[in-house]
Structures are given as structure tokens and as C-alpha cells.
């Protein structure tokens, strides 16, 4: 949260001073009687707390008013006034083999998708001026998020990508690449790239991977391909007869030859990420290779929260006035 006019918050410091001065000025109201016998029946009544409540209500309303006038705001995201000229589509593999736990994050063993999401989130955060979209694929390919500058929205979509969200029995690499290229086709940008991450071979979909690569080449879209996972065998989590978590050795079967050809055909590069450090270095290198040289001017857009404070303040002042003139009315 930020404040557009923070100087109004100094008004909060005046409230204790005003309360102290109020107690110091004037004399307490009193009636003058010739004889106390006239009020003998009411001398044993307890003192009402209504007056103190009404005064505290007024101070609280005044505090809310000062906060409201300071114009509290909550950031809604960032959008550049002028885009960098680089549009990126990231294709994320959600096939069942991505459940293999051959990566470590924070000292704990995690599966391939969890590691990918963590590294990709950092990559997105480091490129605030680029339009980035997401494609999720398994047996079929789906547009998870179109290329957008709203990276807050993109982050929420990325968190929702989970294994089992789509059919992950097979891997449609060609369909994923085709879907990513199609999202970039109509964008008139300086540079368009696809980052394709997978841990398997193309065994589903109607579009062969190299055919999709030819389409990307014709459209001037550069493709970076990443083979994810350890070499040889990968630990796949399973449950034994007692429900305990165990690991089953699963053979790694990444079609590196096809991934290399896709990258070479489109002017990109192929990477093999078989550890947490390697995957982070891959994204760091792509980040350096695809940097924009344009000077960016960005502005943040915020949601105004002023009404959430001013309206209750006015309501409390109205309540204090109403109670003071009705049920808790006092003699002048």
C-alpha cells in the first residue's frame, strides 16, 4: 500500500493534542441550586459513559478522515508506456513425466514442474517491459495466458498450472509450438521468441514438431528449446502397499535431436537442464541474449482506497451527531 498525499497522515499526530486541549479548556457544566435537597434524589446516580463514547467516536472518525485524505492506494501492477519490442511465448509441459522429482528447491526434493514454475517466475519478474504468454500442453496444447504486459495476472496463471489440470498421458510438442507461434503471429514487434520446455518425445497432436518449426522460421519467430530432467533414469514418486511414498526409477526419453533441429531451424538454441543450477543458468542466458536496448518509461496503476476510509468516517460523524441529539442528548 502507498499514499498519494502522505502529508495528511501528520494530522493523526494532532488528534492526541486536540483531545488534551479539549480537556483543558472550559469548565464542567453545572447547575447552581439554593439547596441540595432539591437534587437529593439524583445524587447517587452513576455517571454515564455516553459522553466519553461519543467523544472517542469523533476522534476515531477524524483519524479515518485523515487516512482517507492521504489517499491510500494498492498497486494493481505495472504497464510500460512503450513496450520493449520483445514478445515471448513460453510452452510448459504438463505431461505426467513432469512429476519426476529430480530437482531440489530450498533443500527439498521437488518435481520438474515445480522447479520450472519457480525459475520461470523469476524470469518473468526480470522482464517487466516484455509481453509474455503461456501455453500449457500434454496430450493437447492450450493457451493458458495470451501475451500480456500484466505480469501480476501472468503470475497468478502460472501458479495455477498443475499436473492433472489437463490430460498429461502424452506429449504434443508440435501442437504446443504451433499454438505458441500462432499467439505471436499477429504481433508486430521487434523480436518474437518461443521458449519450449519438455521432458519427453512428441507422441500426440496433429502437427509434427519440425513442421511447426518451419512455420516459426517463416514468421521470423526464434525458438529456444529446453530438455528438462536428469540423464538416464529419473525418480518418479509412487505409493507402496502401505500408502508410503516411494520412488520408482523411470527411463528418461527426451528427443534431443528434434529439439536441437527446432532451435537450429529458427535461429534459437537448445539447452539441456538436468539440475536446478543448470536450469537457472539456461534462463539467465536466454535473458541476456534477448535483452531490449530501448529506454523504457513505465507507470504503475493503482486502486484508490480513499472511499474505504472517508465514507466510514462521515458515517461515524453522522452517528455521533445523531446519538448526541437523541438518546444521549445532554443539557447545555
Image (tube, grey):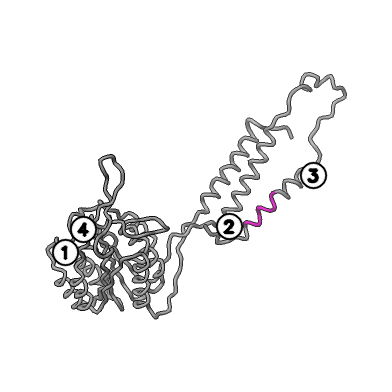
Regarding mark 2 in the picture, which secondary structure is present there?
loop
Regarding mark 1 in the picture, which secondary structure is present there?
loop
Badge 1 or badge 3: first in the primary sequence: 3
- The residue wearing badge 1 is 202
Is residue 288 shown left or right of residue 325? left
- The residue wearing badge 3 is 24
- Please state which of the two labelled residues, at mark 1 or mark 3, is closer to the viewer: 1
Regarding mark 4 in the picture, which secondary structure is present there?
loop
Q: How many marks?
A: 4
- The residue wearing badge 2 is 70
- For the C terminus, which image quadrant? top right
Q: Quadrant of residue 329?
A: top right
- Please state which of the two labelled residues, at mark 2 or mark 4, is closer to the viewer: 4
Badge 2 or badge 3: first in the primary sequence: 3
Callouts 2 and 1 close, C-beta under 8 Å: no
- The residue wearing badge 4 is 138
Residue 98: % across, % down: 26, 57
Q: Label 1 crowding class (10 Å Cα cut-off): few <14, some 14-19, many 20+? A: many
For the point 22% across and 62% down, which residue is it?
Answer: 252
Which span of residues is magenta-colored? 9-15
Amino acid at each position: 500500500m502507498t499514499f498519494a498525499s502522505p502529508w495528511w497522515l501528520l494530522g493523526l499526530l494532532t488528534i492526541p493534542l486536540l483531545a488534551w486541549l479539549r480537556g483543558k479548556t472550559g469548565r464542567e457544566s453545572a447547575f447552581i441550586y439554593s439547596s441540595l435537597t432539591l437534587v437529593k434524589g439524583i445524587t447517587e446516580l452513576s455517571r454515564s459513559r455516553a459522553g466519553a463514547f461519543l467523544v472517542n467516536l469523533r476522534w476515531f472518525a477524524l483519524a479515518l478522515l485523515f487516512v482517507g485524505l492521504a489517499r491510500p492506494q494498492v498497486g494493481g501492477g505495472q504497464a510500460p508506456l512503450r513496450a520493449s519490442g520483445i514478445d515471448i511465448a513460453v510452452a510448459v509441459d504438463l505431461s505426467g513425466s513432469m512429476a519426476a522429482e529430480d530437482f531440489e528447491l530450498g533443500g527439498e526434493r521437488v518435481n520438474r514442474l515445480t522447479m520450472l514454475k519457480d525459475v520461470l517466475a523469476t524470469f518473468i519478474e526480470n522482464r517487466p517491459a516484455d509481453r509474455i504468454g503461456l501455453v500449457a500442453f500434454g496430450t493437447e496444447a492450450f493457451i493458458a495466458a495470451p501475451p500480456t504486459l500484466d505480469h501480476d495476472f501472468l503470475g497468478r496463471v502460472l501458479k495455477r498450472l498443475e499436473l492433472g489440470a489437463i490430460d498429461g498421458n502424452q506429449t504434443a510438442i508440435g501442437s504446443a509450438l504451433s499454438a505458441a507461434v500462432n499467439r505471436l503471429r499477429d504481433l508486430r514487434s521487434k523480436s518474437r521468441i518461443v521458449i519450449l520446455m519438455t521432458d519427453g518425445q512428441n507422441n500426440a497432436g496433429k502437427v509434427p514438431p519440425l513442421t511447426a518449426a518451419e512455420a516459426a522460421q517463416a514468421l521470423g519467430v526464434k525458438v529456444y528449446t529446453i530438455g528438462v530432467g536428469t540423464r538416464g533414469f529419473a525418480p518418479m514418486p509412487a505409493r507402496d502397499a502401505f500408502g508410503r511414498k516411494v520412488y520408482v526409477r523411470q527411463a528418461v526419453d527426451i528427443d534431443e535431436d528434434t529439439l536441437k533441429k527446432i532451435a537450429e531451424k529458427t535461429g534459437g538454441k537448445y539447452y539441456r537442464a538436468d539440475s536446478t543450477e543448470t536450469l537457472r543458468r539456461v534462463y539467465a542466458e536466454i535473458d541476456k541474449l534477448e535483452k531490449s536496448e530501448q529506454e523504457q518509461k513505465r507507470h504503475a496503476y493503482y486502486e484508490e482506497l480513499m472511499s474505504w476510509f472517508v465514507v466510514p468516517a462521515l458515517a461515524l460523524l453522522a452517528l455521533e451527531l445523531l446519538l448526541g441529539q437523541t438518546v444521549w442528548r445532554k443539557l447545555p
